[in-house]
Amino acid sequence: GAVVSQHPSWVICKSGTSVKIECRSLDFQATTMFWYRQFPKQSLMLMATSNEGSKATYEQGVEKDKFLINHASLTLSTLTVTSAHPEDSSFYICSASGNEQFFGPGTRLTVL
Amino acid sequence: DAKTTQPTSMDCAEGRAANLPCNHSTISGNEYVYWYRQIHSQGPQYIIHGLKNNETNEMASLIITEDRKSSTLILPHATLRDTAVYYCIVRVQETSGSRLTFGEGTQLTVNP
């Protein structure tokens, strides 16, 4: 299947700092990318839908000013968690939509 | 998208077939049945999807009942590496990429 990468695979940061997570589709162009969040022992929750060249669409309850999404090219979308707090600690997963939807390996964020 | 119901957990012996059921009684005529799985601390992996005919690929087989209200994912010879959470998702397939709504899934444990 198609390959989607995420960077970094894990990150630890101090409360109040910002963290950027990159999502790349390596062998196909993705008009649409999705960002999910997963807390321990829970299912994936969609945070936002990112379309290349336009503003992201956020799910209800997700703060767009806190979770900044940029989809500047057909192979790259970034999620920036601004002013991170311990409650933002989670597993963040992106997916890219080609013929099907393919997921990245996830980024484990720990905010101290 | 139609709601799906899956058992919370299942066990299977290594080498035997694993049959994972999914109920989707409110499925619409234009909705597909998708299966993904998530191995611990990794991103979800696409397995298979179908509309109304049974489907088979190198990973699994998908059996959809004639009324389309339920389906079964079959792993013909389960291995320890198949231990994962399996998600059954129903959605309309759109050309621009459509969102996936994850339920709680079934935790499949393959035992030696």
Image (tube, rainbow, N blue to C red):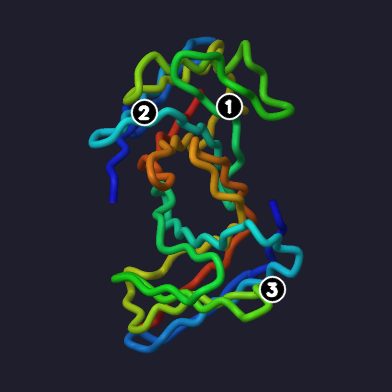
Q: Residue at x 58, y 52 (%)?
A: A41
The answer to whether residue A67 is above or below residue A95 is above
In the displayed structure, B108 sits above or below A112; it is below
Whole-percent x and y of residue A85?
Answer: 59, 20
Q: Quadrant of the C terminus of chain B?
A: bottom left
Q: Quadrant of residue B9?
A: bottom right
The nearer-to-camera label among 1 and 2 is 2
Q: Going 59% across and 75% down the picture, which residue do you hit? A: B71
Mark 1 packing: few (<14 Cα in 10 Å), some, or many (20+)? some
Q: Is residue B102 left or right of residue B40?
A: right
Disc number at residue A88?
A: 1
Identify the chain of the residue marked 3, using the numbered disc in the image. B
Element at badge 2? strand
Front residue of B56 and A105: B56
Q: Which of B34/A63 is in front?
A: B34
Measure the C-alpha gap from mark 3 to mark 1: 38 Å
What is the CA distance from the residue labelled 3 to the residue labelled 2? 36 Å
Q: In terms of image quadrants, where is residue B14?
A: bottom left
Residue A66 image offset from top left, x and y in percent = 60, 14
Q: Subunit of mark 2?
A: A
Badge 3 and badge 1 in a common chain: no
Q: Nearer the viewer, residue A36 or B28?
A: B28
Task: Determine which residue is flagged by label 3.
Answer: B69
Q: Is residue A4 above or below residue A8?
A: below
Quarter residue B81 falls in: bottom left
